[in-house]
């Protein structure tokens, strides 16, 4: 049997007032109460033994600007998976990483059908110990990308534009 890991969460739509205190009225139920323009996009995603995420739709889709949205989390997942994979690959290659930061960007577009991500670009900036082979440290991003299970699970290209500096 192949190696498997299970991940789960519990999503609850909170827009219908399900979490409102009992002494406060819920939403008005009746004609036109639930329309595309009127319903709340607020969600709560819970995990076992971890903090919950208060989420919403992206502002472009009438969501709350102050809450994370699925598109934010897609970029976060790609960026974090690449970073963690790069750090593992670097450690195994005996490249000492002193700092790592990234600015991930994704393009959501409507092309021949529904909206979807069409590409993402990661811009990792990695500081390595002085005297490190900078070309080798940069090459490890390709190996990290090949082993990043999030990048390998999406159906759009993920570009990596790394910068390596000595610290």
Image: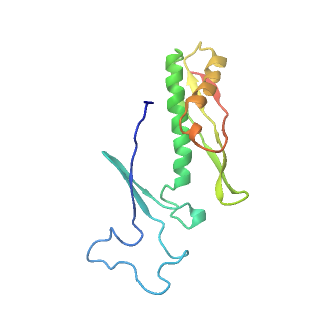
Looking at this view, is 100 or 109 the one in front? 109
Determine the residue located farthest toward the right in the rendered image: 112
Q: Is residue 161 above or below residue 66?
A: above
Count every numbered label the image shows and give the total. 0
Position of the C terminus by quadrant: top right
* Residue 38 spot, x, y in % from top left: 51, 76
Residue 2 x %, y %: 45, 30
Q: Residue at x 63, y 36 (%)?
A: 123
Query: Outermost residue toward the top?
Result: 131
Residue 164 to residue 111: above or below: above
Q: Quadrant of residue 3?
A: top left
Residue at image coords 48%, 61%: 56
Q: How is the image coloured?
A: rainbow
Task: Give the quarter of the figure containing the N terminus.
Answer: top left
Q: Residue furthest front?
A: 1
The residue at the point 56 percent across, 68 percent down is: 62
Picture quadrant of residue 137:
top right
Q: Is residue 86 depicted above or below 36 in this figure?
A: above
Residue 133 image point, x, y percent: 63, 14
Residue 11 drawn above or below residue 1: below
**Residue projecting furthest to the bottom:** 31
- Could you tell whether 30 is left or right of 25 in the image? right
| Residue 8, x across and y down, in percent | 39, 47
Q: Quadrant of residue 143?
A: top right
């Amino acid at each position: 049997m192949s190696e498997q890991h299970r991940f789960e969460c519990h999503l609850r739509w909170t827009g219908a007032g399900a979490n409102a205190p009992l002494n406060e009225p819920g939403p008005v139920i009746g004609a036109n109460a639930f329309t595309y323009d009127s319903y709340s996009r607020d969600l709560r995603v819970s995990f076992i033994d971890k903090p919950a995420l208060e989420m919403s739709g992206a502002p472009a889709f009438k969501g709350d600007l102050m809450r994370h949205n699925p598109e934010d989390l897609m970029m976060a997942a790609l960026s974090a998976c690449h970073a963690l994979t790069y750090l593992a690959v670097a450690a195994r290659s005996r490249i000492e990483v002193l700092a790592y930061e990234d600015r991930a960007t994704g393009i959501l577009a409507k092309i021949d059908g529904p909206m979807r991500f069409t590409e993402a670009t990661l811009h990792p900036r990695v500081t390595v110990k002085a005297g490190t082979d900078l070309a080798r440290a940069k090459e490890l991003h390709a190996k990290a990308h090949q082993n990043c299970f999030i990048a390998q699970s999406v159906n759009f290209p993920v570009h990596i534009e790394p910068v390596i500096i000595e610290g």
